[in-house]
Image (spheres, rainbow, N blue to C red):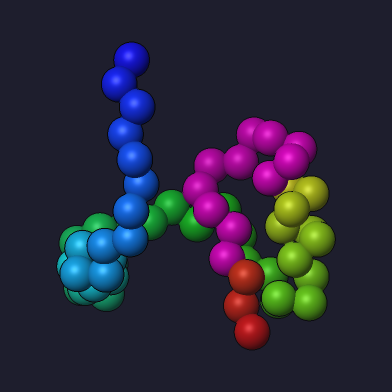
Amino acid sequence: MAIESVRPDGARLAELLALAAYGVLEPRVAGRVPLAEAATAYEKVAGGGQRGRWLLVP
């Protein structure tokens, strides 16, 4: 198994953001919670069975 390093790539991130903004790339979102309720999102993720990412919103 090859081990790959991870490094920041702002240009690639900008491309991915643009694709998401135009609806080409549709991220799977499991739910949204206010930042003040981040513990709720953590409990959901720790419990398993989640499909998608939890978004913390201001």
Q: Residue at x 30, y 21 (%)?
A: 2
- The quadrant in which residue 47 appears is top right
Q: Is residue 7 above or below residue 18?
A: above
Q: Residue 3's image quarter?
A: top left
Q: Quadrant of the C terminus?
A: bottom right
> Residue at image x 34%, y 40%?
5
Q: Quadrant of the N terminus?
A: top left
Residue 38 counted in the magenta span? no
Furthest residue toward bottom: 58
> Magenta segment range?
45-55
Q: Is residue 38 above or below residue 3?
A: below
User: Observer-nearest residue: 12 or 57?
Assistant: 12
Picture residue at 79% right of the left edge, 49% below the top: 43
Where does the image place residue 21, in percent across and percent down from the top left?
A: 27, 74
Any part of residue 23 in sight: no
Residue 25 visible here: yes
Q: Any magenta on residue 50?
A: yes
Indicate the position of residue 51 as horizontal and vertical percent values. Answer: 53, 42
